[in-house]
Image (tube, grey):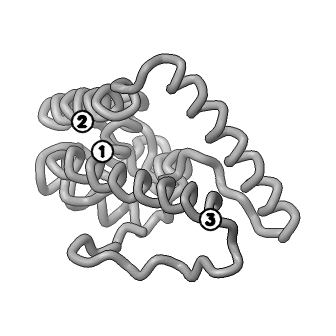
Amino acid sequence: MQNEDHHHHHAPPDMSGLDTLSVEVFSAFRRAMHLNRQLLGRMMATHGDHPGAAGVLRALAERDGISQRDLAEVLHLSRPTVTTMLQRMEQNGLIERWDDEADQRLTRIRLTEKGRSQSETAKESFVTYVDDTIGAMAEPDRRELARLLNVLADNTAAALTRHDLPATTGDDD
């Protein structure tokens, strides 16, 4: 979804054969997803030029000296993807890498001062994003939305199982 181009919307899927209310719900859900991705993407874009950079900063802030291999696992990303991101972050002075003294095959990583401060800023942006969107809803609405989205997620998980499609964990976006 990351290469979605924001200049023109993709044609919505063909909704013939669906009841109007389901179409209305799907359209609202799709619009909310699209706008949320746009807002979060723009707020996070200031924290590195790769969509995952904010996630890398967060992971490193909590795991000083983690190996590159373990970082890829934590982020559910391929090692080459992580390597590319880290090279760019190193050029921008956000991280330091060194070879593990005990095991030369391992590269360890930590945030620099600059990286740590950028990770704090990214965290603040994320808090602001949630406050401005979900936090702006009345408490009963938030409770109800959480309940409804969990029902939708459960139905979706059940459909994945039924169609024998592998589900991924929820934290790899």
Between circles 1 and 3, the one closer to the viewer is: 3
Q: Residue at x 28, y 30 (%)?
A: 132
Q: Which residue is drawn at 66% across and 56% down?
A: 168
Residue type for callout 2? Ala
Q: Residue 115 is drawn in which quadrant?
A: top left
Residue type for callout 1? Ala
Q: Which residue is drawn at 41% across and 58% down?
A: 31
The residue most toward the top is 139
Q: In this view of the protein, which residue sits in the foreground, 115 or 6? A: 6
Which image quarter is the N terminus in? bottom left
Q: In this view of the protein, which residue sits in the foreground, 145 or 129? A: 145
Q: Position of residue 46 (x, y in %)?
A: 14, 47
Q: Where is residue 127 in the image (x, y as percent from the top left)?
A: 31, 27
Q: Which of marks 1 and 3 is nearer the N terminus?
A: 3
> What is the secondary structure assignment of the residue under circle 3?
helix
Q: Which of marks 3 and 2 is nearer the N terminus?
A: 3
Instruction: Find disc 1 in the rendering and name its residue.
Output: 54
Vertical position of residue 105 compared to residue 143: above or below: below
| Total numbered badges shown on the rendered structure | 3
Q: Where is residue 68 in the image (x, y as percent from the top left)?
A: 43, 51
Between circles 3 and 2, the one closer to the viewer is: 3
Residue type for callout 3? Thr
CB within 8 Å, label 1 to label 2: yes
> What is the secondary structure assignment of the residue under circle 2?
helix
Instruction: Find disc 3 in the rendering and name its residue.
Output: 20
Q: Residue 118 is drawn in which quadrant?
A: top left
Mark 1 to mark 3: distance in Å? 39 Å
The dot on residue 122 is 2
Q: In this view of the protein, which residue sits in the foreground, 30 or 167? A: 30
